[in-house]
Image: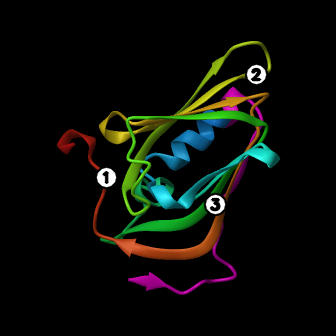
Amino acid sequence: MLMEDNPTMDLLKINALDRADLEVLSANLQDAVISMGDMRYIENQQQFIMVLNRFDWKDALNPKRQKSAYKRHRAGLQFGHVLNVKQLQLNHVDDEAVVALLSLEFEETEAPSGIITLVFAAGGAIKLEVECIEARLSDLGMTWQTDNLPDHDKD
């Protein structure tokens, strides 16, 4: 069920500039689903961008929650200062293939540079070699209901 855009609805916006910020971003993106065709590396701008459907964990875990359905939000995610991108065990040929994001991890190489790893279900990953951490997540306004609560014990 598609929910109408509501100007008073709280749209999530997160800027990540360090490891702690990236952990907050990771928690909000857990179980997001992404079509392979909705990810792009724009080399001349040193940006890796994607459009994804994020699961609303804040709503799902709210103790005052009384609804039976959960929510997903359409969102845009951008990483800046990206020098190189490597895909591991992902179907990068099929633009329609869908992957589920589990977490974002950061491994510092030479401060502030490092590798941001997007970890996907079923063992896939994308590694972004970055000059520094600079990521932005913004909800795009479209929200819909789902009866499905992600459950990793069933995976």
Q: What number is the disc on residue 150? A: 1
Task: Please report the bounds of the magenta region as a residue range.
Answer: 1-21
Residue 84 included in the magenta stretch of the image: no
Q: Residue at x 54, y 61 (%)?
A: 38
Residue sitting nearer the eye, 26 or 50? 50
Q: Secondary structure at mark 1?
A: loop
Residue 125 in sight in this render: yes
Contact check, label 2 and label 3, Cβ < 8 Å: no
Q: How many marks?
A: 3
Location of residue 107 by image quarter: top right
Name above or below for residue 147 compared with residue 17.
below
Taking 10 as reference, is 142 left or right? Answer: left
Residue sitting nearer the eye, 125 or 147? 125
Query: Which x, y percent locates residue 56?
Result: 48, 59
Taking 33 as reference, is 104 left or right? Answer: right
Which callout, 1 or 2, points at the residue further toward the start of the chain?
2
Task: Tell me the kind of residue under disc 3.
Answer: Gly
Which callout, 2 or 3, points at the residue further toward the start of the chain?
3
Q: Quadrant of the N terminus?
A: bottom left
Name above or below for residue 19 compared with residue 149.
above
How far apart marks 2 and 3 lie (CA) works out to 23 Å
Taking 33 as reference, is 43 left or right? Answer: right
Instruction: Point out the frontmost of discs 1 and 2.
Output: 2
Q: What number is the disc on residue 14? A: none
Residue holding disc 2: 113
Residue holding disc 3: 76
Residue 56 in sight in this render: no
